[in-house]
Amino acid sequence: MWLPFIGFIIGVILGLLTDWRIPDEYSSYLSIAVLAAFDTLIGGIRAHLQNVYDENVFLTGFFFNIILAASLAFLGVHLGVDLYLAAVFAFGVRLFQNIAVIRRIWLAKWMEKRQKS
Amino acid sequence: MIALKRKTILHFTLIAAIIGFMLAVQFQTTKRPIVRDTRDIWELRQDLKQEQELEQQLLLEIRRNDEKIQNYEQNHLADQQTALQETVDELKKEAGLTEIRGAGLILTIAPFYPENYVGPIAYTVSPELLKRFINELNMYDAKEIAIANERITNTTAIRDVNGVTQVGNAKISSLPIQVKVISDDVTTLYNRLKVSTIYDDFVIENLQLTVSEPMSAIVIPKYYREWQIRYMEAVKAEKEES
């Protein structure tokens, strides 16, 4: 259960240690990729809690979403429209929805537990 | 089921690690690198000198103002009036409301054409050139400047009005014009002007700048218009409590 957190921390440490920097013009791509990744992760947790989790969906969703978001941002830059905002909006809304679902499931579980005891 | 679960957790861990990595990189990207101070010892010295000069100047000003305050406080009512009058006179002088005499130079700006010149003839001096010229003069420690008998004050505007340059309220529509400059150290001003590159700038506009020999008495007229004071008003005199 704690392994993902440890993985997250390891990732952060690795990122800080490697001292990588992305050129300024690409930082928006990375930020949107981070958002997409978060969305997928939270979505995966929700699916897991709802017992509809599918590995293939999760893994392909992760990479596909990142690539899609980045290419949308790329297209936006070349069209002169801030298209990445569309991705930010979509991911943002979904993130909130998924988190709300997760919260409800946890709440329900907790209530159940309390009624039992 | 347990094997699947373990695999799932592994995947989650992997994804979380990737997210963490991306976050860290993004964080490092947005965190601006600290701007390094790359001044070498001479630049540092120069900056230090500049600051010291500023300090000196400020201290001098503070001392002068302190003296003034002391004057106000020490002297009696009658003397207070004279002290105030002195200040007013001083300020008037600073604002350019008094005629000034002193040693200085007379510079003449005249048209300048090479032989068998064909082309437009200059009737006026462009505002940009005049501004540059005034900056140059101020750089060489000119104290007071008058262009075509128009006193240059802190608020004198030099601008283009329908193709004719206007200095304050005087139009410069015919050449040559005279520029009078007063300085505390005329010889230095003269020498510096001699080697200045401003002549070339004038020649580009088909104008020639000639500098007179240093003169001991030059009169610079006062600013003869009313000052427009918009953001200040006189304080009503309060009754003195005796």
Image: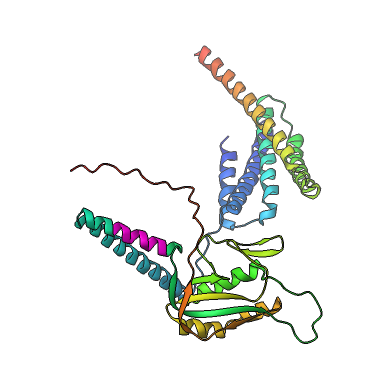
Q: Is residue B142 visible?
A: no
Above or below, A26 against B124 in this view is: above
x 64%, y 76%: residue: B176
Q: Is B51 left or right of A15, judged from the image as shown?
A: left
Query: In which quadrant of the rendered view does residue B239 lie?
Result: top left
* Residue situated in front as seen by the camera: B124 or B59: B124
* Residue situated in front as seen by the camera: B234 or B55: B234
x 56%, y 45%: residue: A9
**Colour scheme used in the picture?**
rainbow
Where is residue B66 shown, x and y percent of the image?
A: 27, 60
Above or below, A86 against B170 in this view is: above
Q: Quadrant of the C terminus of chain B?
A: top left
Where is residue B179 shown, x and y percent of the image?
A: 56, 75
* Residue situated in front as seen by the camera: A13 or A89: A89
Q: Magenta residues?
A: B83-93
x 51%, y 70%: residue: B38
Where is residue B204 shown, x and y percent of the image?
A: 70, 78
Looking at the image, which residue sits at the far top? Answer: A115
Above or below, B193 against B127 in this view is: below
Where is residue B80 shown, x and y percent of the image?
A: 25, 56
Above or below, A101 against B136 in this view is: above
x 47%, y 77%: residue: B218
* Residue situated in front as seen by the camera: A59 or B237: B237
Q: Is A77 left or right of B194, judged from the image as shown?
A: right
Q: Is A72 part of what is drawn in magenta? A: no
Q: Give the main secondary structure of the magenta stretch.
A: helix
